Amino acid sequence: MDRILRAMGKAYHPQCFTCVVCHRCLDGVPFTVDATSQIHCIEDFHRKFAPQCSMCGNAIMPEPGQEETVQIIALDHSFHIGCDKCEVRVPGL
């Protein structure tokens, strides 16, 4: 008589309910699913689907312990708040 975990209309052994990226057990851990119903831990979901900063190239993700973040979108490019810099082009320089 094993314990059964139910999620997304299916039954799982708790040790079998894992993130498709890192394979961490998600029993009792917040998780999300992508458009193809694959299960992800929150961190891997953000790494995989978060917009990329056009300046540094890293994913724009919430800070550890946070659930939200802010991105700046300018000229169809995304930026971290700290990466967004005004560029002034001086003719002849």
Image (cartoon, rainbow, N blue to C red):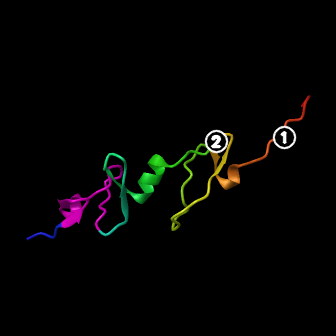
Tell me which residue sits at (26%, 59%) in the image. 8
Label 2 is placed on what type of residue? His
Callout 1: 10 Å neighbours few (<14), some, many (20+)? few
Q: Position of residue 59 (x, y in %)?
A: 54, 49
| Residue 65 in magenta stretch | no
The numbered mark at residue 88 is: 1
In front: 42, or 34?
A: 34
Direction from residue 5 to residue 63 in the image, left or right: right
Label 1 vs 2, first from the N-terminus: 2
Tell me which residue sits at (15%, 70%) in the image. 3
**Outermost right residue:** 92
Q: Is residue 62 above or below residue 90?
A: below
Callout 2: 10 Å neighbours few (<14), some, many (20+)? few
Where is mark 2, residue-wise? 77
Q: Quadrant of residue 69?
A: bottom right
Start-end of magenta stretch: 5-27
Picture quarter with the N terminus: bottom left
Q: Quadrant of residue 53?
A: top right
SS at mark 2 in the image = strand
